[in-house]
Image: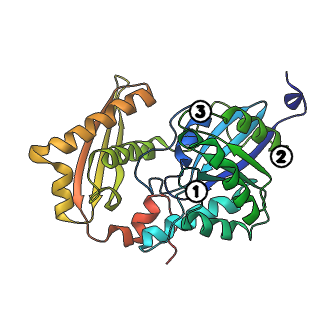
Amino acid sequence: MSESEQEGPRCGLVAVVGAPNAGKSTLVNALAGAKVTIVSPKPQTTRFRIRAVVMHRGAQIVLVDTPGIFAPRRRLDRAMVAAAWGGAQDADRTLLIVDARAGLTDAVRAIVERLAKDRRPIWLALNKVDLIEPPRLLPLAQELNALLSVEETFMISAEKARGLDRLLDRLAEAMPPGPYLFPEDELSDLPNRMLVAEIVREQILRQTHEEVPHHATVETENWQERKDGSVRVDCTVYVGRATQKAILIGDGGARIKAIGQSARRELEGLLDRRVHLFLNVKDRPGWDEERGRLRALGLEDEG
């Protein structure tokens, strides 16, 4: 038994914040060792806080993956940004992820200015360091440290799992003494119904053009356990316009069928059981301004 385990349990919350596409979800998945949040090459993928539970050296590290912080326009956008800052305010540590290749963008500057007002300990992780020349890293780290009081700086590649061992070790050491918040074998507090909806939405992001992805939301309408151990899941995909519905369905239903097949295969791997997945597409203009729809996504309405 390690020294930290002999001292008793340690547990804390770590908010993973950053601009869209900084690699936050990829990092959370890599640290957790499993898929607990969707990953997409398109920005603004994560719409609500997802807690991934990581056990390391006797400490329970609860990672709060937040939506990318950006300039909000719609009610949905405002709710997503509020969720991101809410995640940071609740945490024992804030881990700022910056895309090292993109550098100090206007979006990163805006986040840094907001974090500078926060008294909670802030750590910096420069991500995607495998994609740029090493001489560029130190000046970027120095510039960010000059703008923000950072306790520790890490050079990582979430995609390649580089630098993550040191980050995990330091996070475990930094967690305050206290009882575990989740059972040790629990990976995430994301309910299965919501996981299904997110996996379907990930496939929409991957398989449709720019016109559709962020005007689509997915809700799990029905979850039915079957006697043979399989599960039937019915999901409704809501889009903003009839034209988007047509794009999503595709010729003869080909695209929605492909989305459903890919999502089903991934879900069967994640849930370790047969999944019968049925998708229905509806156009619902203005869904991203509806309070009830935002609450269904796990977001609080900011007015």
Q: Which residue is mark 2?
A: 176
Residue 35 tag number:
none
Name which of mark 3 and mark 1 comes first in the sequence. 1
Depicted 145 relative to depicted 231: above or below:
below
Give the residue at x 73% y 68%.
116
Categorize mark 1 by other alpha carbons within 10 Å: few (<14), some (14-19), many (20+). Answer: some
The N terminus is located in which quarter?
top right
Q: Is residue 5 above or below residue 78?
A: above
Disc 2 vs disc 3: which is toward the camera? 3
Determine whether the residue tagged by mark 1 lies in a helix, strand or loop. Answer: loop
Q: Are marks 1 and 2 in contact (CB under 8 Å)?
A: no
> Label 3 to label 1, Cα distance in Å?
20 Å
- Number of numbered callouts drawn: 3
Residue occupying the point 57% across, 55% down: 66
Gap in angstroms between the C-alphas marked 2 and 3: 26 Å
Q: Nearer the viewer, residue 81 or 226?
A: 81
The amino acid pointed to by label 1 is Gly
According to the picture, the residue beneath numbered tag 1 turns out to be: 103
